[in-house]
């Protein structure tokens, strides 16, 4: 089986009703990223940070995977599909994809502020001040904030370097190190981009662009793959 490696971003879940970050009406237009998604923001105002992620989690519990997520799950019939997602939602999982690496963490999990190995499922949508790990420290969202290291990046780079086909879906490719994963794609592997808007990826003339939303674009991709 050929190996398809997918790098997904917020646009993947847009048709599920979850907002992207950098588009008009995106989350970073309403919120200051350094206030709600950085270690400094956490130091300054934990309540605000917890509220921001509680709101995201509440919306996620009401959201459903969209045809894009389901299309990728179905692709596993014919390909060895490995998803690397920048998304902290669990919609790939809920659509039935079986191999998913979360680069930026998981919204439905919490982590100890003193021992990063202590990770817990969050029951429901709320994580509050006073919610403690088993060692008595405050729990924080299990997400990677701006200014923090991305622990899974090395594993992701290794996966990308084994791709026969590489697919980028719904990411503006603005955030590093995730965006730099494209440099690990083998020269022989075709690269596809599914996005309704232009994504600027300098120097990659071999990219095949499917300028559509994820839901529809996946169908085009599957047709293209029939020729691979
Ligand atoms: N289908 C596919 N792509 C879409 C759709 C859709 N229905 N709707 C929008 N898009 C595209 C946009 O055109 C844009 O290129 O999704 C992309 C979203 O880009 P960003 O908002 O920048 O999100 P992303 O690239 O995932 O952000 C990366 O930044 O804020 C941090 O940690 C956060 O993981 C996130 C990271």
Image (cartoon, grey):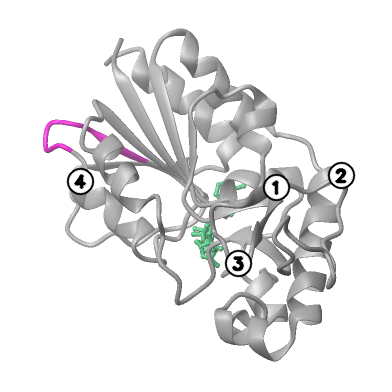
Image x and y of residue 54, in percent: 82, 63
Confirm if mark 4 falls within 8 A of ligand 1: no
Q: Please identify, in this view, whether the residue under mark 3 or under mark 1 is nearer the observer.
A: 1
Q: Residue at x 78, y 48 (%)?
A: 122
Instruction: Give me the disc on residue 184.
Output: 4
Image x and y of residue 52, in percent: 77, 71
Residue at disc 2, secondary structure: helix
State which quarter of the image contains the C terminus: top left
Q: Please identify, in this view, whether the residue under mark 3 or under mark 4 is nearer the observer.
A: 4
Q: What segment is highlighted magenta in the picture?
A: 186-192
Image x and y of residue 222, in percent: 45, 20
The CA distance from mark 1 to mark 2 is 21 Å
Residue at disc 3, secondary structure: loop
N-terminal-most mark, 2 or 3: 3
Confirm if mark 3 falls within 8 A of ligand 1: yes
Q: Quickly name the residue at label 1.
A: 120
The CA distance from mark 3 to mark 1 is 26 Å
The CA distance from mark 2 to mark 4 is 36 Å
Confirm if mark 1 falls within 8 A of ligand 1: no
State which quarter of the image contains the N terminus: top left
Q: Residue at x 41, y 29 (%)?
A: 82
Residue at disc 4, secondary structure: helix
Q: Please identify, in this view, whether the residue under mark 1 or under mark 4 is nearer the observer.
A: 1
Apparent side of residue 8 relative to residue 200 in the rendered image (left or right): right
The CA distance from mark 1 to mark 4 is 32 Å
The answer to whether marks 3 and 4 mark residues whose Cβ atoms lie closer than 8 Å is no
- Quarter containing ligand 1? bottom right
């Amino acid at each position: 089986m050929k190996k398809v490696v997918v790098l997904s971003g917020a646009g993947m879940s847009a048709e599920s009703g979850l907002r992207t970050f950098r588009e008009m009406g995106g989350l970073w237009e309403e919120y200051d990223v350094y206030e709600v998604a950085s270690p400094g923001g956490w130091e300054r105002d934990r309540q605000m940070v917890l509220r921001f992620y509680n709101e995201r989690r509440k919306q996620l519990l009401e959201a459903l995977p969209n045809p894009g997520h389901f299309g990728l799950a179905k692709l596993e019939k014919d390909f060895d599909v490995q998803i690397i997602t920048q998304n902290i939602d669990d919609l790939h999982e809920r659509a039935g994809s079986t191999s998913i690496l979360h680069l930026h963490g998981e919204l439905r999990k919490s982590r100890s502020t003193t021992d990063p190995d202590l990770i817990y499922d969050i029951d429901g949508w709320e994580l509050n001040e006073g919610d403690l790990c088993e060692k008595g420290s405050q729990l924080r969202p299990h997400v990677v904030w701006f200014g923090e290291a991305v622990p899974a990046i090395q594993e992701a780079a290794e996966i990308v370097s084994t791709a026969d086909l590489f697919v980028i879906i719904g990411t503006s490719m603005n955030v590093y190190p995730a965006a730099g994963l494209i440099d690990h794609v083998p020269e022989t592997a075709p690269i596809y981009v599914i996005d309704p808007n232009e994504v600027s990826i300098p120097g990659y003339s071999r990219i095949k662009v499917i300028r559509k939303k994820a839901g529809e674009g996946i169908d085009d991709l599957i047709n293209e793959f029939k020729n691979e």
